[in-house]
Image (cartoon, rainbow, N blue to C red):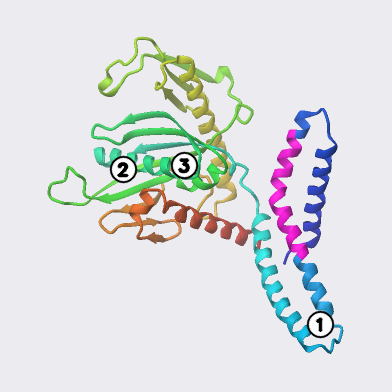
């Protein structure tokens, strides 16, 4: 049952912010703050307004039924319409209940995605490359912008390590559950006997943060510069353009050498470092709040096996929600990935609602 007073308060705040934006002049910072607040309330406010409209329509029809009308046709039409409106109200109530759930403040953020080959040698690197292509296609389908920040190719293709910055609306909301160990079962091209091998790759999805979100003190970092190297260790640059930043308190180390400019490599390394520090702090907070939940939103637990891609059977299984889809090709081409993501988001909402109702 929805709390009418709470809904009225949301509408009151929404209208108040709207009026402030119309009358405010000169203070750009305050206007920007109000615009963010307005944007956060706009979706639920519009749904509540629709809910109130349908409630009024149903109330008017209830009045007709209670008026002892002798026009049978009118009464019958009113009864049918009330049934339709009642079902509509029930559906809107579900939407409002979901919109009232506690929000992950990072859902609207862009992300830094890190993919690393795990157990399985060359086959693991090939699989890491397959995952990278899947996520790049998924980003393209959603019209998100991708910047490859670092890549270290495997000897026979794929990637030993791949890091990219994906920017756009609600990127983290869609990709946050991709963090963890992805396992592949298939016959490698190099396998002459046709034996199925199992390999793995690790995915970490980090919300992209700004300097204001994570302050990094100069005294807390050590910056080393060195000459960039390519496969096999050969030098690919005649200047010390590569950068390695070590965060002394946490021990986190980030290296960047893809750019020819030392300054640009430093910027990229700091961006990744900020994301990893933010993730570390977020994980600690989330694990306290979600210790009794299977999905552990945004935990990025890289040791947890979350999904298996079985090529001989053409299936993909997400172990957290026991979902198996026989759509491996579609998923690896990215079109079918949204179905898994939607199922994970729905399960997460269900768990939150169950917790709210305890």
Q: Residue at x 77, y 68 (%)?
A: 55
State how many labels appear.
3
Of labels 3 and 2, earlier in sequence is 2
Of labels 1 and 3, earlier in sequence is 1
Query: Which residue position is annotated with label 2?
Result: 127
Q: Which mark is residue 65?
A: 1
**Vertical comparison of 357 with 222: above or below:** below
Asked if the magenta segment contains residue 75, the reply would be no
Kindly check if marks 1 and 3 are in contact, taking CB atoms under 8 A apart as contact.
Answer: no
Q: Is residue 50 left or right of residue 280?
A: right
Disc 3: CA contacts within 10 A as few (<14), some (14-19) or many (>=20)? some
Disc 2: CA contacts within 10 A as few (<14), some (14-19) or many (>=20)? many
Residue 127 in picture, x, y percent from top left: 31, 42
Mark 3–mark 2 distance (CA, rounded to whole Å): 18 Å
Asked if the magenta segment contains residue 44, the reply would be yes
Range drawn in magenta = 32-53
Residue 75, by quadrant, is bottom right
């Amino acid at each position: 049952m929805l709390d009418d007073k709470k809904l009225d308060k949301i509408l009151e705040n929404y209208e108040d912010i709207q009026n402030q934006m119309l009358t405010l002049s000169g203070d750009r910072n305050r206007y920007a703050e109000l615009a963010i607040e307005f944007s956060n309330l706009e979706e639920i406010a519009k749904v509540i307004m629709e809910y109130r409209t349908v409630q009024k329509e149903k109330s008017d029809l209830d009045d007709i039924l209670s008026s002892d009308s002798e026009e049978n046709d009118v009464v019958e039409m009113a009864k049918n319409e009330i049934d339709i409106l009642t079902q509509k109200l029930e559906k809107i109530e579900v939407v409002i209940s979901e919109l009232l759930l506690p929000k992950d403040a990072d859902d609207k953020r862009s992300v830094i995605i890190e993919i690393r080959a795990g157990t399985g040698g060359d086959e693991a690197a090939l699989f890491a490359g397959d995952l990278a292509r899947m996520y790049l296609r998924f980003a393209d389908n959603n019209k998100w912008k991708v910047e490859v920040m670092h890549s270290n190719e495997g000897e026979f293709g794929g990637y030993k390590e791949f890091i990219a910055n994906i920017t756009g609306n609600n990127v983290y909301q869609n990709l946050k559950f991709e963090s963890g160990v992805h396992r592949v079962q298939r016959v490698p091209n190099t396998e002459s006997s046709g034996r199925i091998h199992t390999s793995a790759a690790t995915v970490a999805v980090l919300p992209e943060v700004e300097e204001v979100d994570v302050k990094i003190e100069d005294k807390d970092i050590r910056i080393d510069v060195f000459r960039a190297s390519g496969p096999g260790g050969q030098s690919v640059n005649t200047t010390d353009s590569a950068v390695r930043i070590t965060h002394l308190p946490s021990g986190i180390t980030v290296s960047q050498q893809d750019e020819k400019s030392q300054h640009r490599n430093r910027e990229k390394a700091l961006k990744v470092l900020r994301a990893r520090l933010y993730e570390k702090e977020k994980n600690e907070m989330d694990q306290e709040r979600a210790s009794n939940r299977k999905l552990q939103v945004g935990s990025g637990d890289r040791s947890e096996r979350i999904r298996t891609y079985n090529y001989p059977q053409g299936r993909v299984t997400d172990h957290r929600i026991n979902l198996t889809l026989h759509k491996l090709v579609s998923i690896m081409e990215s079109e079918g990935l949204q179905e898994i993501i939607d199922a994970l988001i729905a399960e997460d909402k269900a768990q939150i609602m169950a917790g709210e109702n305890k």
